[in-house]
Amino acid sequence: MRERILVVDDEPQILRAVRTSLQAAGYEVDVAETAAAALTSAASRPPDAVILDLVLPDGNGIDVCRELRRWSAAPVLVLSAIGDEQEKVAALDAGAGDYVTKPFGVEELLARLRAILRRAAPAEPLLKVGDLEIDLEKSALHRNGELVQLTPHEFGLLRLFATNEGKLLTHRTILREVWGAAYQTESHYLHVYVSQLRQKIEDDPTRPRYLLTETGAGYRFVDPKS
């Protein structure tokens, strides 16, 4: 079966362009122009992913994302205007998987959509990223075939990053997932542990290839060989 994508935007020309591009790429497409219509469509015809504009005539895309996260596991790709950095971070904290800045190219949109769909698939127990081999069942890391000793929090961080490869994770999201809701503002914890993790996975921790900093937003874990 073809994957169904729900596209939510109040600009008719963008809806038409995105729908045409997605259909040409083999996806089934539903569209909505308002927050209310988006939630109704997602409930009646559950999508495999949602492409969501942040500015809607009857509400905020962040609120739509937050509501979707209450009852849907469909990954959300946010469309945002240039300069809306805080809005992007808020959307990611609300559960969005990634964002594309307007104006965007079709190939970038399709690539990011494929990425969030891949990340939504069940994680394999053994992940390989570059020279790293991460065993989720045994909580073990091998780098170039050698076992690397990690503390429980370091492996918790690595697990979160590796199972969200390519996705921008905000500071608040990482703290909540690894340390718990009470630590969402304790960013100094995160900086210390990210530094320690880089010491163990990077060839040169001062010039990281795996664990990249997204200034003002969070971190992104990538495969340097891809």
Image (cartoon, rainbow, N blue to C red):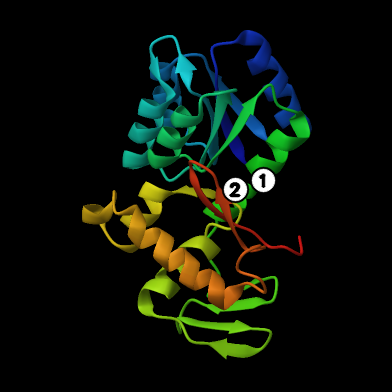
| Residue that badge 1 annotates | 114
Quarter holding residue 138: bottom left
Q: Quadrant of the C terminus?
A: bottom right
Task: Please name the amino acid that badge 1 sits on.
Answer: Arg
Q: Quick one: label 1, few (<14), some, or many (20+) residues within 10 Å?
A: few
Q: Nearer the viewer, residue 66 or 26?
A: 66
Residue assigned mark 2: 117
The answer to whether 219 appears left or right of 94 in the picture is right
Above/below status of 82 relative to 187: above
Residue placed most toward the observer, 76 or 31: 76
Which residue is more in the foreground, 192 or 31? 192
Residue 171: percent from the left, percent from the top?
41, 49
Quarter of the figure with the N terminus:
top right
Query: Which residue corresponds to the image point at 51% horizontal and 43% vertical from the top-left?
Result: 97
> Helix, strand or loop at disc 2?
helix
**How far apart are labels 2 and 1 at the CA level?**
5 Å
Q: Note whether 120 is above or below 53 in the view shown.
A: below
Q: Which mark is residue 178?
A: none
Residue lying at the far left of the rendered structure: 182
Which secondary structure, mark 1?
helix
Task: Give the x, y percent position of residue 219.
Answer: 52, 52
Instruction: Measuring from the top left, give residue 26's x and y in whole percent.
Output: 74, 37
Please count the marks in the image. Answer: 2
Q: Position of residue 37 (x, y in %)?
A: 43, 18
Q: Residue at x 36, y 48 (%)?
A: 172
Evaluate if marks 2 and 1 touch, with contact meaning CB atoms under 8 Å apart. Answer: yes
Residue 126 in view: no
Under mark 2, the amino acid is: Leu
At x 66%, y 16%, the residue is 14
Q: Is residue 106 visible?
A: yes
The quarter of the displayed image where residue 15 is located = top right
